[in-house]
Structure formats: structure tokens, C-alpha cells
Image: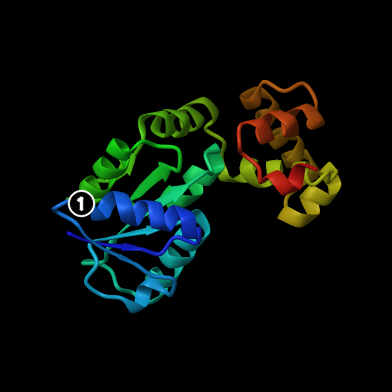
Amino acid sequence: MKVLIAHADVIVSAGLAALLGAQHDMQVTAIEGDPLEYSGADVIILDHRKGLEHMRRAAAAHHGEGQPRVLIVTQLEREWEVRTAMMAGVHGYLLQNSDTEQLLTAVRSLSRGIRYLSAELSRCVADSFTRIGLTSRETDVLQLLAQGQCNKSIARELGIGVGTVKTHVKGLFDKLGATARTHAVVLATRRGLVSEHYSH
């Protein structure tokens, strides 16, 4: 199988190339440029930012079927980071501290068209979905709460009534097990449900 490595971290890239290059069933190419310019790869390995960028651009280019599978190798392990990547359509997600065995399993799974998410990440993402079950509107309200906005400005921003905002805030408290707005934001941040930069 042909594996293309276009990871932003040079050291990670070199390590991946060495580990995968030693496998008799893999033909490995490491590049610094745009993976979309290279055709014929079965699996592309990228970091989180480049992975999301690649999925966006590949979708815009309407390449559809027959596209290489995308594996993200990253240190980012928070629920929303993993979820964002999976929802963008990446096929595999692997943490940089994974062992060689996991890396090989991930690449081989993807080349066969099977998605790959390590056991601990699958658990964390599944947990977040079952445990939380926030509606998209509650998620919007949560992000604005995290920015310190009051009910009135949240209502204005989302084009809904203040009473509706209060209902959503109450729903958030119930689902997160929070007792106050700041408590809700702290809990949500700890669980990776809001972007880190909002909560400071």
C-alpha cells in the first residue's frame, strides 16, 4: 500500500516514515507540500490542523470515492478535538504516544476501508455522546456562556427569546451536573466541550 506522510512536525514525520518504511507491505513517501497534489496514495498521515484543512479542501474539490484515507496523528486528545476531526470525515485518529503496533493497525485498517480510533479515544468520544447528548442549540448557548455573555446578549446573538435561553441554560446545567454558569463552563472545558481559548 502507498502511504503519504505530510505531518507538520518534522520529527514526528521522520519517525513515522522510519517505522512504516520498515514494513514490507508499505511504500512510504514523506512530503512537506500539499497532499492534494499527490495522487495514488492509499493512506495520508497528517497532523490535526492539516488533517482538517485537507478534509475541507478535498470536499470542496469533490473528489469523492477513491480518495485516500486520512489518518491524523496528534497529541490532541480532548473530546471536542477528536469529535471535530471525526465529524470532518477523517478515517483514523491516533495519539502521538501510541505504540508501533497501534500505528500499523491504524494504517492497515484504513487501507482496507475500516475506520480506526484507539480504544481509549473511542471510549471518550462514545462517553461524551451518551453522557451529554447536548442539542446543537444547547451547544451554541454553551459556547456563548463560555465567552461570558449574559442571557440577553445570547438571545440577541442566536435570535431567540430570553426565556428560551433560560430553558437551554437549565438543560445545560442538568446535563453537565452544574450549579452555576461559571461551574457549567468549567465542567464543559474540562470535558473538552468548549474550545480552550473561550474559557480564559
Compare residues 93 and 57 and report the one nearer the observer. 93
Residue 116: quarter of image: top left
Can residue 192 be seen in the rendering of this structure?
A: yes
Out of 122 and 151, give the one closest to the viewer.
122
From the viewer's perspective, tell me whether residue 55 is left or right of residue 131.
left
Amino acid of disc 1: Gly
Quarter of the image for residue 43 reads: bottom left
Classify residue 17 as left or right of residue 55: left
Viewer-proximal residue among 185 and 166? 185
Residue 46, percent across and down?
Answer: 42, 58
**Residue at image coords 35%, 79%:** 37
Q: Nearer the viewer, residue 54 or 20?
A: 20
| Residue 107 spot, x, y in % from top left | 26, 49
The quadrant of the rendering that contains the C terminus is top right
Q: Position of residue 44 (x, y in %)?
A: 32, 61
Q: Percent x, y for residue 26? A: 19, 56
* Residue 83 vertical position relative to residue 125 in the rendered view, above or below: below
Total label count? 1
Circle 1 Cα neighbour tier, 10 Å, few/some/many (<14 / 14–19 / ≥20): some
- Quadrant the N terminus occupies: bottom left
Q: Is residue 158 above or below residue 170?
A: below
Q: Is residue 88 visible?
A: no
Q: Judging from the image, what secondary structure is the residue with disc 1 in?
A: loop
Q: Residue furthest left?
A: 25
Residue where numbered disc 1 is placed: 113
